[in-house]
C-alpha cells in the first residue's frame, strides 16, 4: 500500500496517526517515517500491521517473509 492508502485505512478504521503511534510505541514523527517509507524498521512495521489487523506484506509490499527489500 502507498502511504496515502495507509492513511486512508487509518481514517476508515477511525484511528489517528497519533493513536497508532502510541499503540505501537513510537513517536508520531517516527510512525510517519515508517508509513512514508523513510524508515524501514521491521518490528515497527510488524506492530503497525498487527494493530491494523493486516499482514506486513499487505501494508508494505516490498516486505516479504520478514525481509525488507529496497526497490529501485
Image: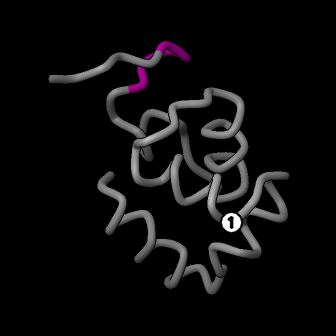
* Residue 55 versus residue 67 in the image, above or below: below
Quarter of the C terminus within the rendering: top left
Splitting the image into 4 quarters, where does residue 70 fall? top left
* Of the pair 49 and 72, the residue shown nearer to us: 72
Instruction: Decide if residue 27 is on the left or right side of residue 48.
Output: right
Residue 27, x across and y down, in percent: 75, 59
Dot 1 surroundings within 10 Å: few (below 14), some, or many (20 or more)? some
* Residue 55 versus residue 22 in the image, above or below: above
The answer to whether residue 12 is magenta is no
Give the residue drawn at x 34%, y 66%: 5
Please state the extent of the stretch shown in magenta in the rendering: 63-67
Splitting the image into 4 quarters, where does residue 53 fall? bottom right
**What element does badge 1 sit on?**
helix
Instruction: Decide if residue 11 is on the left or right side of residue 8.
Output: right
Q: Main secondary structure of the magenta part?
A: strand
The answer to whether residue 64 is magenta is yes
* Residue 69 versus residue 40 in the image, above or below: above
* Of the pair 72 and 55, the residue shown nearer to us: 72
Give the residue drawn at x 22%, y 23%: 71
* Residue 60 versus residue 6 in the image, above or below: above
Residue 17, x across and y down, in percent: 63, 73
Give the residue drawn at x 62%, y 86%: 14
Residue 49, x across and y down, in percent: 61, 47
Splitting the image into 4 quarters, where does residue 28 fall? bottom right
Residue 68, x across and y down, in percent: 44, 18
Instruction: Decide if residue 31 is on the left or right side of residue 1.
Output: right
Task: Name the residue beneath numbered marker 1.
Answer: 28
Give the residue drawn at x 34%, y 35%: 61
Instruction: Decide if residue 43 is on the left or right side of residue 59.
Output: right
Amino acid at each position: 500500500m502507498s502511504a496515502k492508502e495507509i492513511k486512508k485505512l487509518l481514517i476508515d478504521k477511525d484511528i489517528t496517526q497519533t493513536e497508532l503511534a502510541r499503540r505501537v510505541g513510537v513517536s508520531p514523527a517516527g510512525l510517519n517515517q515508517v508509513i512514508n517509507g523513510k524508515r524501514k524498521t521491521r518490528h515497527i512495521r510488524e506492530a503497525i500491521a498487527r494493530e491494523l489487523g493486516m499482514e506486513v506484506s499487505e501494508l508494505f509490499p516490498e516486505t516479504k517473509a520478514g525481509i525488507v527489500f529496497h526497490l529501485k
